[in-house]
Image (spheres, grey):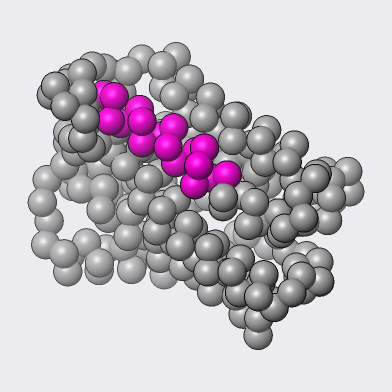
Amino acid sequence: MNKIGTKGLLLRIFIPTTVFSLSYLLLGHFCNIPQILLFCILGTFILVPMELWMILSASKKESGKYSLKSAFVRHEKIAVWKILIIAFIFFCIAGLILAFVAPIENQIFAKARASVLNNLPLGFDWTNYDYLKSFSKQMLIFTCIYFGVFDVLLGPITEELFFRGYLTSHYKKQSSFTPILVTVLFSLYHFWLPFNNIFRILIFTPVAFVAYKKKNFYISMCFHCLCNLFASISLALAVLG
């Protein structure tokens, strides 16, 4: 197994998200579709392929063929019902953090967020539902469906394979701090949502730690998908309800 040093870890995380985020920022000034839809399309064709390619390439070097094997180095089987229960418990905890911590973080960064968004087209504010509703019903339905598929399945599954699977298992300094470090970097890599890092770190660190200790990142994957499902449903209700 090819171990990854701290420099290699940072490069593997921040090069893809920099390319993706700059593409999103630049194209978002000229697109005639909802920016959130553009985000999902670019994620599908830029971010996801780059992260999967690193996993496939590592597997090729380690086993001689392209596969997802390098993401499952420390992976051990757990009963599906146990995975779902653990993920759901952490999802409930995340709901409490959303209710009590997220509003405080939003208040702390309200001015900085407003300052950034004031210098960008309206669509970069994903909570600007009046802007989204200016598009046709058909476009909104397509946006919600695409967002749901990308945000609930493609995005989180790829990220968990990449962060909790490949990067966590291959980082050369293995300790109980490894999943915490990777989770902090995972939060910071969300350049497109820079004002929610405290919330993300608080909800993902415990589940990432448990997944690391139990050697099964399906726990964090299910949790991640559940959280994003909640966000996708909320978006659909806001713009289509």
Choose between 96 and 118: the one closer to the eye. Answer: 118
Count of marks placed on residues: 0
Residue 37 rendering spot, x and y as whole percentages: 63, 57
Choose between 15 and 224: the one closer to the eye. Answer: 15
The residue lying at 40 percent from left, 65 percent from top is 226
The residue lying at 74 percent from left, 74 percent from top is 136
Image quarter where the C terminus lies is: bottom right
Magenta-colored stretch includes residue 44: yes
Relative to 193, is 3 on the left or the right?
Answer: left
Magenta highlight: main SS: helix
Q: Is residue 174 above or below residue 232?
A: above
Image quarter where the N terminus lies is: top left
The residue lying at 49 percent from left, 33 percent from top is 185
Choose between 132 and 195: the one closer to the eye. Answer: 132
The residue lying at 21 percent from left, 30 percent from top is 66
Q: Is residue 79 above or below residue 10?
A: below
Relative to 180, is 39 on the left or the right?
Answer: right
Relative to 195, is 222 on the left or the right?
Answer: left
Residue 175 in view in this figure: no
Q: Is residue 127 above or below residue 209?
A: below
**What residue range appears in magenta?**
42-58
Q: In this view, does 217 lie above or below 228?
A: above
Residue 197 rendering spot, x and y as whole percentages: 59, 45
Magenta-colored stretch includes residue 120: no
- Would you identify the image quadrant in which residue 29 lies? top right
Residue 178 rendering spot, x and y as whole percentages: 33, 31
Residue 88 in view in this figure: yes
List the single residue furthest toward the bottom: 241
Residue 44 rendering spot, x and y as whole percentages: 49, 47
Choose between 174 and 225: the one closer to the eye. Answer: 225
